[in-house]
Amino acid sequence: MISNPLLLDLPKNWLIAKLVWYFFAEKGKEAAKYTKEYCSSNPGDYPVYSGQTTNDGIMGKISSYDYDAGKVGFLFSTTVGAKAMRLNHLKEKFSLSQNCMLIKSRRSEINVRFYYYHLMPLFQYERGLISEHMQASFRVEDLSRYYIAVPPLDAQKQIADFLDKETARIDKLINKKKKLLNILTENLQAKLDQITNYKKGKAIRLRFLIKLNPGKSEINNLPDDMEVSFLPMVAINDGFGGINDLKQTKNLNSLLDSYTYFSEGEILLAKVTPCFENGKKTIALNLKNSIGFGTSELHIIRIIKNLVPEYLMLILSSSKFKIAGCISMTGAGGLKRVSENAILDYRISLPSIERQKLTAGRFKKNCVLVEYTKDKIQSSMEKLKELRSSLINETVTGRLDIEKWRKRNNVSLGFKKITKQ
């Protein structure tokens, strides 16, 4: 029984068939062998694809390959987790790691590129039927449950060529907007580096202005059942810092042994990579009973004298401080940490309290303006992505007449409406 609404009301000369009549799936030949460590030890020119990586699924590149898909290519799908049933079209030589599979054509009279686009919305629909509470998975045998449309071969090629061209135009616009977002962030960082490069007067080490990681002994006399704030790392913003969620509270006695203590007004600075490099930090405000706890991967900074918290946040966000922190990192693998001395021995020239407040206030206004602009750009990017998705859905189901579309030049009109924003 065909339940996918995308296969209803197809053109009269299109067939409907089981997916397995035209395609079969297989897992990687030696998937378990291809780990990040293996890729590092066997560098080369041939990509290894995995279902659990970014970078278009490429885990690394090695000196050998298991598959040669030629110019026609094979379809590639992720199989597990949040990324399950995401498609790619792989060509030439490569290998497969885990959490993914290949979908290969059985027949020569089909256009693989068309089915790359055709299966995209079909798989997205099927993926949406899986409950959010379940671990999503896509098995080789699942292909037997799905149906596909089968247009005439010339229509398949026409649709594939059309979508290649039009999605490339949309992707180009999206990438331009991504670059603009990066430029805005880089310019704001440059502005921050400029205003924190204050050199008047004698430089002083932070150890004379702050207390780092205050001990829990100062709250020993508080009742065990006192409700206090709990702040996981994900609740701390990247970039220039801030808190995105302060709703969690817990009893004091459940946090004392394993978590890091802080109090109202103190600065929380992520010390572990990559959170430190990503700029995770915040001023602890509006804490339940003025007390909070967070992950052990935080440095807590308590200002003793002559520093405005918002100005110190700018110092901690500067490129110069980040470089010093990264140089000081110690530890194995991916869990390197910023040392306490990197913070305590960091030198700054200290402006007056009034100048610190003025500088922090001005930069905050800049941040507000930049964030407003970035929100506008993000909104236009989302509309472009929606246009891309809609264009694919309508075209691969035969609902969009390509020739009429071209004559009306609707793509360009859609671009103009979005880019004007």
Image: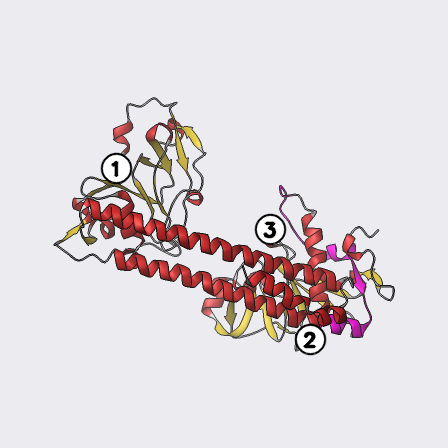
Residue 162, visible in the rendered structure: yes
Residue type at numbered disc 1? Pro
Callout 2 amino acid: Val
**Residue 78 versus residue 245 in the image, above or below:** below
Q: Compare marks 3 and 2 and give the one earlier in the sequence.
A: 2
* Residue extending farthest left: 202
Q: Compared with residue 414, is residue 108 higher up or lower down, i.e. above or below?
A: below
Q: Looking at the image, which is closer to me, 44 or 30?
A: 44
- The residues colored magenta run 132-160
Q: Give the quadrant of the C terminus.
A: bottom right
Q: Is residue 61 left or right of residue 338?
A: right
Q: Is residue 138 magenta?
A: yes
Q: Looking at the image, do the residues carrying marks 1 and 2 touch, with CB atoms under 8 Å apart?
A: no
Q: In the image, is residue 18 above or below residue 256? A: below
Q: Position of residue 376 (x, y in %)?
A: 50, 55
Mark 1 neighbour class, 10 Å CA radius: few under 14, some 14 to 19, many 20 or more = some
* Residue tagged 2: 72
CA neighbours of label 2 inside 10 A, class few (<14), some (14 to 19), many (20+): few
The earlier-in-sequence mark between 1 and 2 is 2
Q: Nearer the viewer, residue 235 or 195?
A: 195
Q: Is 246 above or below relative to 375? A: above
Q: Residue 81: which numbered mark, if any? A: 3
Secondary structure beneath dot 2 equals: loop
User: Given contact means CB atoms under 8 Å apart, are the residues at marks 3 and 2 in contact?
Assistant: no
Image quadrant in which you'd find residue 266 = top left
On screen, residue 159 versus residue 177, left or right, reads right
Amino acid at dot 3 = Gly
Using residue 276 as the reference point, say whether residue 162 is left or right of it. Answer: right
Residue at mark 1: 214
Identify the secondary structure beneath mark 1. Answer: loop
Element marked by disc 3: helix
Residue at the farthest bottom position = 71
